[in-house]
């Protein structure tokens, strides 16, 4: 079976409002699948339904062949979840937390300590093993919460906004850990509202807005949907405001944007546009300092697909009370 | 067998992690000790008569306070979610939480009882019956604490809600006044509360007192409370999970 997760028509209503509106998608074995959307899009609700923490209003999902409604305990054995809030036990040490997780997941007695220590080493937490969870920094808490989710050898790891609230270095370290876990054959399902994070980590992305999936594809294919909007950016030695009105009407130029010393030509026919534009600029005494062709980014594609302002994606959720 | 092991792991973790929590120390340990000392200093000779009631109260306050902590505290920090996410049946979680609270309450109660033995010349005439009555009562009180706590969010709310039940029980359950001597309709309320049967059972074990009802009835009624409170807690717990998660 290549699809390790199959979601069918999953729906969740809160009152009369649909938080998740008939979504369907598949996650392939061994891939990093990203759920990208602004806060309130329904990412966490979807994860919680898939791991058996929230009851769907209708629809279902198969996780490693087990129906989330009919076999929730089997589903829970197959998965590990790292929630948005690092919620291990503040009173227990890092090592005790991992051993306790191993105990309640039924890891055999002989393996518990060995596996816990191995995870502490892999996650760079060995020197903190005797510190209580509440005394660890936010980044270390996050790492330990991921380690705890891996103690029972799950096949799928669910990560809800893994880097939210972390400093740049911790977030970078965490992304590396996620990619390392993928290399070991783990399937990873993560939610994020950071477009660059989705782009750098995910093999495939589902863009979700207001409980509906707008697109599911690889980041490359999603960017390709914007192919028509290539940009020729020419840097000049002066502010080219005076040139704008004099530009000849060249077929294929959709829009001209002037940004300080740079002039950007949005075009679908870069091959036809480039030569006449440069000839015109040189003919008018403008000295060309740089030439760039800007490919559309995932952010551009996101804005086009969702109609949302990409700035909206930079807003973090207010942090919940808890042992962050 | 696997389920029993997990019940034990949950209880062991709860006892290790929470026994020093301030609300537990104040309500589950300090209050019973203060009760015992207050009665001892007031009338050292007469304390023997109220000892069954004081032991019952100690068990009630320590078990319900621990139950409030293990449920509400974990709900607040989001750790209860970890248990719901693990491959565990809801009843396993409930068994584990009940076991942890009961053992904590029993340890406190036994320690206080041991201190009372030499101080007031207390003798436990029927140790086996004494053990049965405090174990059954401990489980019933823990379940009562859990039942109250699953519906609230904060530890202080759980403690306040618990006091709605605990404080009236001090007066209604034969701790200081015999139930039959209370004016009507108070005895009817008394018969609906588990502490009444704990105190009555303890009177059988600790005093040469025949109690209100035979000892075996105290045990059977407490067993009934355990089943009733467990079923109710399981029902409410499942309902709250559906609502809150």
Image (spheres, rainbow, N blue to C red):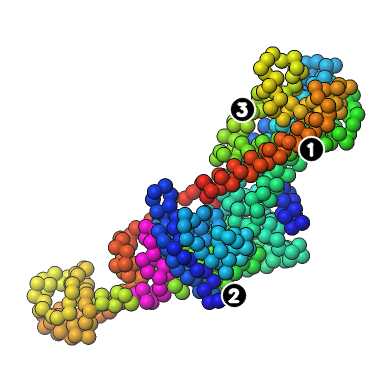
In the rendering, at what x and y percent does residue A92 appear?
A: 67, 51
Contact, mark 3 vs mark 2 (Cβ under 8 Å): no
Quarter of the image where the N terminus of chain B is located: bottom right
Please determine whether, in this image, residue A258 is positioned above or below residue A321.
below
Number of other residues with Cα within 10 Å of mark 2, as a class: few under 14, some 14 to 19, many 20 or more = few
Question: Can you tell which quarter of the image residue A299 is in?
Answer: bottom left
Q: Secondary structure at mark 3?
A: helix
Please determine whether, in this image, residue A283 is positioned above or below residue A63.
below
- Chain for mark 1? B
For the magenta stretch, what is the residue range?
A: A205-223
B75, B232: nearer the viewer: B232
The reply to the same-chain question for discs 3 and 1 is yes
Q: Which residue is mark 2?
A: A184
Q: Which residue is mark 1?
A: B135
Residue located 76% across and 37% down the image: B223
Q: Which residue is mark 3?
A: B164
Distance in Å between CA atoms under marks 2 and 1: 49 Å
């Amino acid at each position: 079976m290549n699809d390790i997760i199959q979601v069918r028509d999953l729906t969740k209503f809160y009152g009369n409002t649909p938080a998740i509106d008939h979504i369907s998608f598949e996650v392939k074995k061994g891939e990093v699948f990203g759920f990208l959307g602004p806060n309130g899009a329904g990412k966490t609700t979807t994860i919680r339904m898939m791991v058996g923490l929230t009851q769907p209003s209708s629809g279902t999902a198969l996780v490693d062949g087990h129906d989330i409604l009919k076999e929730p305990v089997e589903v829970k054995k197959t998965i590990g979840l790292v929630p948005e809030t690092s919620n291990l036990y503040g009173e227990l040490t890092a090592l005790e937390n991992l051993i306790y997780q191993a105990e309640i997941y039924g890891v055999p007695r002989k393996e518990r300590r060995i596996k816990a220590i191995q995870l502490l080493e892999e996650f760079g937490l060995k020197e903190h093993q005797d510190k209580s969870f509440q005394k660890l920094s936010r980044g270390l808490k996050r790492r330990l919460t991921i380690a705890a989710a891996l103690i029972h050898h799950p096949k799928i790891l669910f990560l809800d906004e893994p880097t939210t609230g972390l400093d740049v270095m911790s977030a970078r370290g965490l992304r590396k850990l996620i990619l390392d876990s993928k290399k070991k054959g783990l399937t990873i399902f993560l939610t994020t509202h950071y477009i660059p994070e989705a782009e750098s980590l995910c093999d495939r992305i589902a863009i979700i807005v207001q409980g509906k999936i707008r697109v599911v594809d690889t980041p490359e294919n999603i960017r390709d949907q914007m192919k028509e909007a290539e940009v020729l950016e020419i840097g000049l030695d002066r502010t080219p405001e005076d040139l704008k009105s004099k530009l000849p009407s060249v077929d294929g130029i959709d829009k001209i944007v002037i940004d300080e010393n740079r002039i950007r030509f949005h075009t679908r026919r870069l091959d036809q546009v480039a030569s006449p534009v440069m000839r015109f600029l040189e003919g008018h005494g403008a000295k060309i300092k740089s030439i760039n062709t800007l490919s559309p980014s995932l952010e551009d594609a996101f804005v086009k697909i969702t109609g949302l302002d990409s700035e909206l994606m930079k807003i973090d959720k207010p942090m919940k009370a808890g042992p962050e | 067998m696997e389920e029993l092991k997990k019940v034990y792991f949950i209880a062991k973790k709860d006892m290790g992690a929470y026994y020093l929590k301030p609300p537990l120390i104040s309500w589950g340990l300090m209050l019973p000790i203060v009760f015992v000392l207050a009665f001892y200093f007031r009338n050292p000779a007469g304390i023997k008569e109220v000892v069954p009631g004081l032991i019952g109260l100690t068990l009630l306050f320590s078990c319900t306070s621990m139950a409030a902590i293990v449920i509400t505290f974990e709900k607040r920090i989001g750790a209860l979610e970890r248990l719901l996410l693990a491959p565990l049946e809801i009843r396993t979680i409930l068994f584990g939480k009940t076991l942890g609270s009961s053992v904590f309450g029993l340890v406190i109660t036994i320690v206080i009882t041991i201190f009372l033995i030499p101080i007031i010349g207390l003798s436990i005439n029927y140790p086996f019956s004494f053990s049965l009555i405090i174990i059954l009562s401990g489980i019933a009180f823990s379940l009562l604490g859990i039942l109250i706590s699953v519906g609230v969010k904060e530890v202080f709310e759980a403690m306040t809600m618990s006091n709605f039940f605990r404080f009236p029980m001090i007066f209604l359950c034969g701790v200081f006044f015999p139930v039959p001597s209370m004016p009507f309709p108070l005895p009817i309320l008394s018969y609906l509360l588990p502490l009444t049967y704990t105190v009555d059972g303890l009177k059988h074990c600790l005093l040469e007192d025949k109690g209100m009802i035979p000892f075996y009835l105290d045990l059977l009624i407490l067993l009934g409370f355990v089943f009733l409170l467990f079923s109710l807690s399981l029902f409410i717990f499942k309902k709250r999970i559906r609502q809150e998660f």
